[in-house]
Amino acid sequence: MQNDIQLSVISTIVFALATATVMMFQDRGMTQLYGHVQDYPWWYLAVSYGAVLVLQDGWFYATHRLLHRPALFPWFHQGHHRSRAPTPWTSFAFDPLEALLQALFLVAIVLVVPLHFITLMAVLTTMTVWAIVNHLGPDHLPLGFPHHWLGRWLIGPAHHSIHHRRHGKHFGLYFTFWDRVFGSEDPAYAASLLAPGPSPLPPPRITSHTSARPTEPPTTTSANRSRPTPTPAPDAAAVSTIRAQRVAKPAL
Ligand SMILES: [Zn+2]
Ligand SMILES: [Zn+2]
């Protein structure tokens, strides 16, 4: 946790510098930010908000997947994965270069897409809250959330916890869309969504080396070789075991 807090402080500094850069661009009239709602139709507030989330999710997916390449992982992304059981402190525990990469998106987007200040604040708030929720751990939301018709398309703690166990799966930030399209969705998670039931991911403390074995080793790098023994992946057997241990709940 201490490592997560240290990296979060550094990330905060990087995002603050990005904010200062945006303010400098704004002073020079270089951004597309606007302050009068009348400048664009009312509906544009909602459309631009959704569009930025979709664009940011695509940027995050692409860069996140790239940063898991062995040549980049130790420099950009190792810090975020020091916590195999993430907590909210992990949400913004980025190595400085990764923080810079994600902050650059926000700087670039205000240069290209017309955004009301309120829309920008809404995007930043959504990003912050969503990142925290994704790192809550799978047992802090209703167990049926991933089975909800909308929950299937939204990334939550059950979905992202799998990424912290299996580095080759679940790279998205907000939506499950890109993981589905590019085949990085955990098959056990996908299979579990076909039937109503509890969360597809068992809480970390429940799994053991005897109840489940990883079906895919994490990406091998010089950096992650030094990490503790990997926690078993949520393969189909583990999911079945946990389902049997829990009281079945109907889909939401
Ligand atoms: Zn990652
Ligand atoms: Zn994470």
Image (cartoon, rainbow, N blue to C red):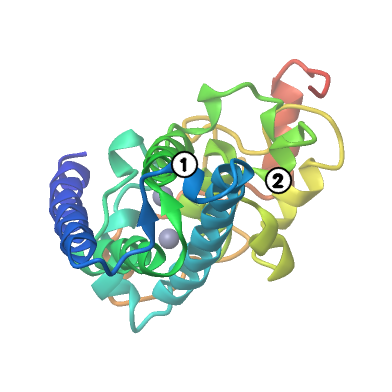
Number of marks present in the image shown: 2
Question: What distance separates the C-alpha of mark 1 from that of mark 2?
Answer: 31 Å
Residue at point 43%, 69% (across, down): 112
- Give percent across and percent down for residue 75: 24, 74
Q: Nearer the viewer, residue 210 or 252?
A: 252
Residue picked out by circle 1? 37
Q: Crowding at label 2, few (<14), some or many (≥20) Cα neighbours within 10 Å?
A: some
Q: Nearer the viewer, residue 21 or 87?
A: 21
- Do the residues under discs 1 and 2 have CB atoms within 8 angstroms? no
Amino acid type, mark 2: Trp
Q: Is residue 209 visible?
A: no
Res. 153 mark: 2
Amino acid type, mark 1: Val
Q: Give the position of the C terminus as an image quadrant.
A: top right
Report whether 252 appears left or right of 238. Answer: right
- Give percent across and percent down for residue 59: 49, 67
- Looking at marks 1 and 2 on the same chain, the residue that comes earlier in the sequence is marked by 1
- Give percent across and percent down for residue 64: 45, 67
Residue at point 43%, 39% (across, down): 122
Residue situated furthest bottom in the rendering: 71
User: Tag 2, which secondary structure?
Assistant: helix
User: Tag 1, which secondary structure?
Assistant: helix
